[in-house]
Image (cartoon, helix red, strand yellow):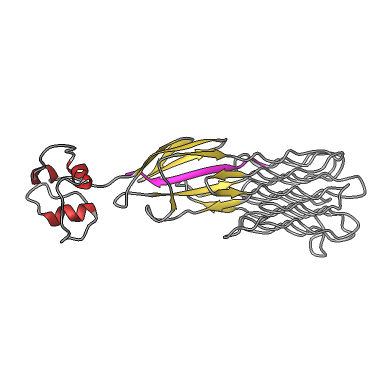
């Protein structure tokens, strides 16, 4: 808090500078001159009355909003986060982040042979919530921001596509894995969250999540498929694995794994849902932007933009849904 506006002592100055109350003070030192606002010449105690040493992080980039004492920078496409003031311990010195990669695409099927699987959600990494001085350290510099695109949905003549990574500083979230594809072994692709396995005459395995591994994990595996049910597995989500496709209790396509809710922007929003797997009874996309699966000749639903949701699978000669693009959000105390 600021020094008193009336009579003050050296202990008040020390307290504002973060020193011990009895520390010796050099009135010509840079911290004292900075607090007094007197860069040269003689400093008197009156120059130090009602002065504050508080400094807050200040930055530009993205779409800027506020929530209480916090400023939020949201990047829905690639850009630059430029820090002009790194603050100090009396105000704020660190930021919180949410980095979500692009989701993987859902896969197509082949008539009377296989049903497509859901795409995995993009990797989900978050530091929120932390105190104003206990989060991710930053400095006065420019940080390039990469927002990953979702994997493009494709028809039965091509393979599925993983999503692209999103990057802030040392934090990289891996793109979601595409759903298993008919002309390949049918396994779901690995990724931030794994793609589901295609539903065919033999059991298949969903793609691994949290690939490459980070702690805490950035995602979950895609759902497996069982022999004989021709039902694709659901894509993995940020907080839940994709559902298995074609089980005795669920002969339909697997649901996509649910994403994670975050209030980093001041409102609770879910992101990172996996795509649904296809079958005569289609799976639904996971909460947080996952695309629903479709049957017949309909294309799978796309993952929702800027959620990292996986695309939904489809049943026949149509296209799997595209993955949703990712997002990067940065939050810090600014007053």
Tell me which residue sits at (69%, 46%) in the image.
310
**Residue 241 painted magenta:** no
Furthest residue in direction left, as rendered: 7
Q: Which residues are magenta?
A: 324-335
Return the x and y of residue 195 as percentages of the image width and height.
Answer: 74, 52
**Residue 333 painted magenta:** yes
Residue 327 visible in the snapshot: yes
Tell me if 66 is positioned left or right of 111 in this view.
left
Q: Quadrant of residue 222?
A: bottom right
Tell me which residue sits at (16%, 52%) in the image.
13
Residue 270 visible in the snapshot: no
- Between residues 81 and 240, which one lies in front from this camera angle? 81
Return the x and y of residue 209 as percentages of the image width and height.
Answer: 68, 56
- Between residues 271 and 229, which one lies in front from this camera angle? 271
Return the x and y of residue 153 as percentages of the image width and height.
Answer: 76, 39
Furthest residue in direction bottom, as rendered: 248
Q: Is residue 217 above or below residue 292?
A: below
Furthest residue in direction right, as rendered: 112
Tell me if 33 is positioned left or right of 316 in this view.
left
- Between residues 63 and 147, which one lies in front from this camera angle? 147
Return the x and y of residue 20 as percentages of the image width and height.
Answer: 20, 61
Task: Locate the C terminus by quadrant.
Answer: top left
**Total tally of numbered discs in the picture:** 0
Tell me which residue sits at (49%, 54%) in the image.
127
Tell me which residue sits at (67%, 45%) in the image.
103
Tell me if 202 is positioned left or right of 17 in this view.
right
């Amino acid at each position: 808090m600021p020094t008193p506006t009336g009579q003050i002592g050296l202990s008040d100055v020390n307290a504002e500078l973060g020193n011990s109350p009895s520390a010796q003070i050099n009135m010509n030192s840079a911290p004292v001159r900075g607090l007094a606002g007197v860069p040269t010449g003689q400093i008197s105690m009156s120059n130090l009355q009602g002065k504050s040493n508080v400094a807050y992080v200040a930055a530009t980039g993205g779409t800027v909003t506020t929530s209480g004492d916090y400023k939020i920078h949201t990047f829905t496409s690639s850009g630059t986060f430029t820090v002009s003031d790194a603050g100090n311990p009396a105000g704020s010195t660190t930021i919180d982040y949410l980095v979500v990669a692009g989701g993987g695409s859902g896969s197509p099927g082949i008539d009377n042979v296989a049903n497509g699987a859901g795409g995995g959600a993009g990797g989900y990494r978050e530091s929120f919530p932390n105190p104003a001085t206990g989060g991710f350290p930053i400095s006065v510099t420019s940080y390039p921001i990469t927002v990953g695109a979702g994997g493009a949905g494709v028809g039965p003549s091509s393979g599925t596509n993983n999503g692209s990574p999103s990057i802030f500083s040392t934090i990289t979230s891996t793109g979601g894995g595409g759903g298993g594809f008919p002309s390949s072994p049918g396994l779901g692709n690995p990724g931030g969250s794994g793609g589901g396995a295609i539903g065919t005459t033999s059991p298949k395995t969903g793609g691994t999540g949290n690939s490459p591994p980070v702690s805490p994990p950035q995602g979950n595996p895609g759902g497996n498929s069982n022999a004989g049910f021709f039902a694709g597995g659901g894509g993995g989500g940020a907080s839940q694995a994709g559902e298995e496709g074609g089980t005795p209790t669920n002969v339909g396509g697997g649901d996509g794994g649910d994403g994670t809710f975050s209030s980093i922007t001041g409102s609770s929003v879910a992101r990172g849902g996996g795509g649904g797997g296809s079958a005569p009874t289609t799976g639904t996309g996971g909460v947080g932007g996952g695309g629903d699966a479709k049957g017949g000749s309909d294309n799978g639903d796309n993952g929702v933009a800027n959620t990292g949701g996986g695309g939904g699978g489809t049943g026949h000669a149509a296209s799997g849904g595209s993955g949703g693009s990712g997002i990067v959000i940065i939050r810090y105390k600014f007053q």
